[in-house]
Amino acid sequence: MASARRARLAAIDLMRRFEVREEPFGAGAFGYWPKGEPASGLWQRVAGKVFVKRVRGPRRNGILAPLNMKVFPRELMVWPDADCTAVVNAALLESRCIDGVAGPAEGFERWFARWRDNGSTERVFPASLEQGSGAYLTWFEGRHEPGALNDLDVVVNANVLFALGLSGALENPGADEAARFLNRAVLEGWYREFRSVSKYYDDNLFFHYTVSRAYAEGGVRSVGPAVGALAEDLLERVRVREDGSAYWDLGHPHFNTACAVLTLLNAGRRDEVVARAVRYLVREQCGRRGCWERMTAFVTSSDAGVRVYWSSEAFTAGMVLEALYRWVMVRERGRREAAGGRLTELDGVAGGDDPA
């Protein structure tokens, strides 16, 4: 337990370093990269122009640059974003409860409300939704220039709702509209062409998980229709092996299955398929290294069509371990309920009621 706490606190300390306090931002806004320096020397500017010409964009002209590059073209530097701001502040909220450390900055929710799809921003994703939806935009474009390019992403909006739910701020402007966006994306089938609703995540069932997490752990009951439909979608797509174990495979079966298990538990489903999927995850663990397979965590494209992928073995392990832990808690809760015992320390661990 002590080593786990040290690891959590180290992770929280790392995340805090990505807070963006430069104007016009302040406490509570986070970015994917830290504050960077644009190319300044002659050869650096020339190399930067060649790089920009090759990838063409997107040109955000932000203030953040990659950690592993000493200089970076100003045109390709990015701004803080709603996704990082949501997940980091959610982690700070949870760490405050678990470890008693300082939580997020007061009023961090305001950053989401400032950058919404109100019709004044040129939105490039998704094309299936009318302009002015009111949902949360991905990028906190620092200059707020008229016509600045931005986009809506279903996973980003799910993560924002999760953070708002944890902080008790579901009255934040845009929360209702974000929930409406997610429900439409699921019930009208947009998510089946996943690149049309997410520019930064792969079609790997992580979307299913984030929406169900907002519902069960964030208390965002307004996305119940989406959660119920996503749970049914998973039950239709499950595969069963000869040994009776069950799994999902969209290219990364270990990660896909972990996301599916967590989604079903968050949806209040206790189908036998969940137990079979847990069996699959246990049997698939690498006996030598104790891990599971690497997966594609994030993906994006330049305006020239250059695809960039971020992959992670640790991300898979984290999701699988969460799924296994949650399943153990569900079984223990079921045993205690059958015995008529009280469930004080386990209440709420297994997720919400069935929204379907």
Image (spheres, helix red, strand yellow):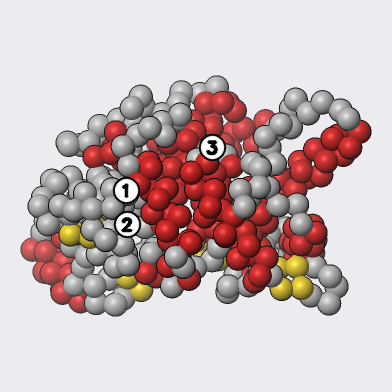
Q: Please count the marks in the image.
A: 3
Point out which mark residue 136 bears.
1
Q: Which amino acid type is marked by label 1?
A: Tyr
Q: For mark 2, what is the residue?
A: 152
Kindly indicate the quadrant of the structure image that contains residue 194. Answer: bottom left
The residue pinned by badge 3 equals 219
Position of residue 234 measured from the top left corner of the image (x, y, whole percent): 63, 65
Is 223 positioned to the left or the right of 328 in the image?
left
Residue 13 is situated, as x and y percent measured from the top left of the image, at 45, 35
Kindly tell me whether residue 103 is visible in this rendering: yes
Residue 333 lies left or right of residue 19; in this view the side is: right
For the point 14% across and 46% down, the residue is 144
Query: At 60% from the left edge and 70% from the top edge, which residue is drawn?
Result: 252
Instruction: Assign a secondary structure to mark 1.
Output: loop
> Residue lying furthest right in this view?
339
Q: Label 3, secondary structure: give it.
A: loop
Q: Mark 2: give few (<14), some (14-19) or many (20+) Cα within 10 Å.
A: many
